[in-house]
Structure formats: structure tokens, C-alpha cells
Amino acid sequence: YQYTNIGAGSADNDDLPYGGFRSETRNKLLNSILTMSELYRFWKPAFLDSASPFYQLYFGSYQGLSITYPAKKYNPTFNALKRPWYQRAISNPELFVLTTPYADATSGVLVASGATVITAAESEFAFGVAAFDYTFESFLQYWSAVMDSVCSSGGSTVCYLIDSSAFLLYYQGIANDQSDEDI
């Protein structure tokens, strides 16, 4: 963390612990650290907007570096490349993907994630994955506002939301099941 706050262009390999990085990775990693810290400039206004649906914004690079807004302290073994949001986005680089609801690891709040691949400039290769969490409660409010006229018609219409991997993201009555262990 302290190396993301040094300032653009002033980090030197000799300043890093254990003699720094091998020369073939040094420039890529230091550039990524400096680039990723700039994401805060874009995220802060979106996050602080009173109508913002965001619970958290984050990015994981293909080198394994990650950054979140607002900042959170993660377990040292955290690896964004192994997270479902990262894996799902990398597996479907042309799509915006959603995850099934899950309990946030640091707060326990029920959230879901949206994610998309970010490609390197002038390249087809993934630089990493940008993602966001939104509370599942805000999703339910959105769903109600948009779909209640169809789903709550009292007729035989039943609404479900299923993703491209056949995961069930929404069904009528899910609000009553949020405390179930399998969500």
C-alpha cells in the first residue's frame, strides 16, 4: 500500500523490499501500481453520488495486484485472480457478468458483483477485471421498481432471473430467503 502513495514516477526498484523485482517484471508491476492508484479519481465521485448503487468498487490486474474503493484490509492470502467475479469475467471477456448473491467477506452484508474485462491499451489482451459490488437489498429494490407490474400481477406469471451459466439470481420470494446458508 505504501508504494501506491509514493507519487507518480518516483518509485524506484531500489526502494522496494528484498532488492526489488526482477528486471523483466519491474516496469510492468510498478506501472500497474501507479495506474491502479489513479482509479480512485474515477471511483470516488461515482461511489459518493447519492443515487449510487455501489457498495464497493474494485480492480484486479492479471499480475495479481488489486485495489478497492473504499479501501479495505484483506487477508494476506487474498488473490483477486481466484475470485468468482474475476474468473467469470475472464472466461467471458466480451460480456458484462453478474455473480450470484454472497455474503461479503469483510462485512457479512449480502452482495452481488458485476464485472468486466479491461484490455490493455491498443491490445486484445486483458489487463485485468474491473468490478463492483451492490447490496442485494438494492438489487431487490431495483427489481421491484422495474418488474413488479409484471411479476406481481396475481396471474400465472412467475419471474426468475437466470444467468448464462444457469445460476439462479432471482426468484419470487428470495427476499424471504436471504438468511439461508446456501445464498
Image: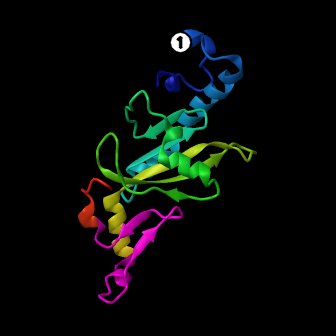
Up/down of 79 relative to 135, above or below:
above
What kind of residue is marked 1? Pro
Residue 28 image position (x, y, % from top left): 67, 28
Rendering quarter of residue 72: top left
Up/down of 145 relative to 76, above or below:
below
Residue 101 image position (x, y, % from top left): 37, 56
Q: Residue at x 27, y 53 (%)?
A: 181
* Residue 40 visible in the picture: no
Residue 123 image position (x, y, % from top left): 74, 45
Residue 95 image position (x, y, % from top left): 60, 59
Give the labeled residue for mark 1: 17
Q: Which residues are magenta?
A: 147-174
Q: Does 170 appear in magenta? A: yes
Q: Residue at x 35, y 74 (%)?
A: 145
Q: Residue at x 69, y 42 (%)?
A: 120
Q: Secondary structure at mark 1?
A: helix
User: Left of 28 or right of it: where is 36?
Assistant: left
Work out whether residue 165 or residue 118 is closer to the camera in this orientation and state it.
Answer: 165
